[in-house]
Amino acid sequence: LPDHYVKKYYAKTVCLHIWDCISLHNGSLNITPGAWYSWWNGNKVEGDRVFQTSESEDGNMPLFIRENAIVPLCPEPPSFIPDRSLKALEIMVPLTGEAQGEVVEYFDRESLLAYDVVFTLQGNYIRGRITQKNKGRVPSEYKPPETLKILVNHSIQNVEFSTAAREFSVQPDPGRKSWTLVTVNDAVLPLEFKLW
């Protein structure tokens, strides 16, 4: 595919490839090396080859997420004007080894409210840690989200927290085979957990 057909977006550890299907010839595209996951169905695709895509599987716009990326799924973009905190934060992690990243909720020239996120695959389980990071004077309206959702590319049955007991649920993601959504209500940070 010529370079002008491919748009690449990079943000720290997140790397997304987006292709315009109208520009695709016969539904094939060249995926760069590494493991990638379809945004639409969660299927794993090995890179460094030509990949056949279809509108029914990958939507009108093929979108792939690189393995071990931390992808925040927020209902709204980070705020520049003191307003309010997010009520819920969802983090998507296509994990094959270790994933690290920073999710920013609020920032201005002098202030920052963010969450450091680390996930590590260790044998049959996943260890995770989410910590809050404050710099400068963050407006008082900003607090950690009440609900935290973790979407991982593994079948999860159990959750264990190393801090106080929490109310949580574990359910398969309906749109992505073998992906699991873990929802934690009244999340208190720092949050350390084990998924298996």
Image: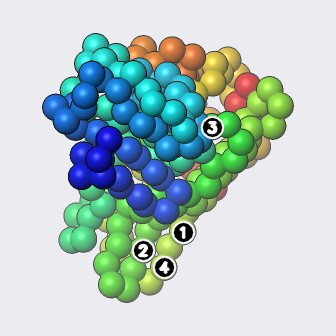
- At label 1, counting other C-alpha atoms closer than 10 Å, the crowd grade (few under 14, some 14-19, many 20 or more) is some
Give the amino acid at mark 3: Leu
Residue 164 visible in this rendered orientation of the protein: no
Instruction: Identify the mark at residue 135; answer none if there is no mark.
Output: 4
Up-down: is 186 above or below 171? Answer: below
Give the mark nearer the N terminus: 4 vs 2.
Answer: 2
Please name whichever residue, 102 or 115, is drawn nearer the observer in this view of the structure: 102
Up-down: is 118 above or below 80? Answer: above
Front disc: 3 or 4: 3
Task: Report, in whole angstroms, how far the alpha carbon at label 2 lies from the one at label 3.
Answer: 27 Å
Residue denoted by label 2: 112
Number of numbered tags placed on the structure image = 4
Residue contact at pointers 1 and 2, CB within 8 angstroms: yes
Q: Left or right: where does residue 59 sit relative to residue 72?
A: left
Q: Left or right: where does residue 132 sit relative to residue 121?
A: left
Residue contact at pointers 4 and 2, CB within 8 angstroms: yes
Q: Quadrant of the C terminus?
A: top right
Residue denoted by label 1: 133
Task: Report, in whole angstroms, how far the alpha carbon at label 3 lies from the one at label 1.
Answer: 23 Å
